[in-house]
DNA sequence: AGTGCGGCCTGTCCGC
DNA sequence: TGCGGACAGGCCGCAC
């Protein structure tokens, strides 16, 4: 499922094909995504040109001179660059066709994704304005996490998955980063020491950067803009490995539910702060 | 304000 | 082999 590394991989993959090419036609086959696609979208976009492909958290921002197309991949969404006459399949919901006969295609079987148009600064959009900081920016640090964790009683895994705190850390990488930082996912956010948060911030950056280098994690159907799968799955140490042996100490990895999400950790390696 | 949970979706897998 | 049902999950929006 697309988390920050997958979205960044998509961004890099589509960027060279999207920037500077005039939009000729837009085809919307399915309007009902997470939010309804604006019926006017084809008219709005036709004739315009994207000049930037940016990312904020897991949102892709395709800027034109009059507004921004906001794309979220949800759980199962993907973007690909294809020839414009490439036959559309069942879950191919949106095609943006350029004057050079290339097509940017949005595919999303579960339709948790979104394609939205705004004429305002997207940073002020209701979906984006409350987002926390980017994990790969310098301001994201152990001090930052420690400061925001004061009086927060939720499990640290849910804390780092909260997009008002830090964006882009989804279930896979939250599990992986906590394993890397040797912190139990169940620990209350306020009980974690500054030193632990410094390690955790480091681990989050390290894991996300490594995943981006590998082109993301392909679980079922994630492909980059150029149609390549991601290879980070080979590096996952806990996610999807419940019941299997810890790669470090061979203890059987424990799988629990935290905030309705599957959580996998090693009770041996991630237990230094006894509250387990 | 912080926390918890329902709901939106469909492909996959499991048991009968 | 076919079918129902559980499950997966990002994240908004509501309830407490």
Image: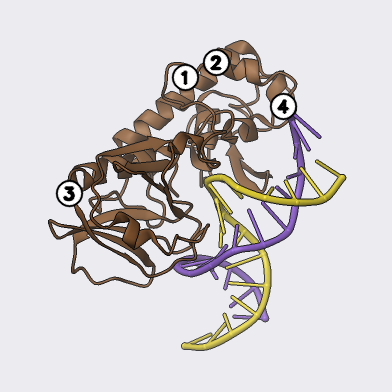
Chain colours: A brown, B purple, C yellow
Does residue A80 sit above or below A141 in this rendering?
below
3D distance between C-alphas at marks 4 and 1? 19 Å
| Dot 1 and dot 2 within a common chain | yes
> Which one is earlier in the sequence, the residue at label 3 or at label 4?
3
Give the x, y percent position of residue A147: 64, 15
Does the CB distance between marks 3 and 2 fall below 8 Å?
no
| Secondary element at image label 3 | loop
Residue position for label 2? A142
Give the x, y percent position of residue A236: 44, 39
Residue position for label 3? A21
> Which one is earlier in the sequence, the residue at label 4 or at label 2?
2
The foreground one among A6 and A94 is A94
| Dot 1 and dot 3 within a common chain | yes
What subunit carries mark 4? A
> Which one is earlier in the sequence, the residue at label 3 or at label 2?
3
3D distance between C-alphas at marks 1 and 3? 39 Å
| Secondary element at image label 1 | helix
Give the x, y percent position of residue A18: 22, 47
Residue position for label 4? A188
What subunit carries mark 1? A
Q: Is residue A269 visible?
A: yes
> Which one is earlier in the sequence, the residue at label 4 or at label 1?
4
Does the CB distance between marks 1 and 2 fall below 8 Å?
yes
| Local crowd size for mark 3, using a 10 Å CA cut-off: few (<14), some (14–19), many (≥20) | some
Residue position for label 1? A202
């Amino acid at each position: 499922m697309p988390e920050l590394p997958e979205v960044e991989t998509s961004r890099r993959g589509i960027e060279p094909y999207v920037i500077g090419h005039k939009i000729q036609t837009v085809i919307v086959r399915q309007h009902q995504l997470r939010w309804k696609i604006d019926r006017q979208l084809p008219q709005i976009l036709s004739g315009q040109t994207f000049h930037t492909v940016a990312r904020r958290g897991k949102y892709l921002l395709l800027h034109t001179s009059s507004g921004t197309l906001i794309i979220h991949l949800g759980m199962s969404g993907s973007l690909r660059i294809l020839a414009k006459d490439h036959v559309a399949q069942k879950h191919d919901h949106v095609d943006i066709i350029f004057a050079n006969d290339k097509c940017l295609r949005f595919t999303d079987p579960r339709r948790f994704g979104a394609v939205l148009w705004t004429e305002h600064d997207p940073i002020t959009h209701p979906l984006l304005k409350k987002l926390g900081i980017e994990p790969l920016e310098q301001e994201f640090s152990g001090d930052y996490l420690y400061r925001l964790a004061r009086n927060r009683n939720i499990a640290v895994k849910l804390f780092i998955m909260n997009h008002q705190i830090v964006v882009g850390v989804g279930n896979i990488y939250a599990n992986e980063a906590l394993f890397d930082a040797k912190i139990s996912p169940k620990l209350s956010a306020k009980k974690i020491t500054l030193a632990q948060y410094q390690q955790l911030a480091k681990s989050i950056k390290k894991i996300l950067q490594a995943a981006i280098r590998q082109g993301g994690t392909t679980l079922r159907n994630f492909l980059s803009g150029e149609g390549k799968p991601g290879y980070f799955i080979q590096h996952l140490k806990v996610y999807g490995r419940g019941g299997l042996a810890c790669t470090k100490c061979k203890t059987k990895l424990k799988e629990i539910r935290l905030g309705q999400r599957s959580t996998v950790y090693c009770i041996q390696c991630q237990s230094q702060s006894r509250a387990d």
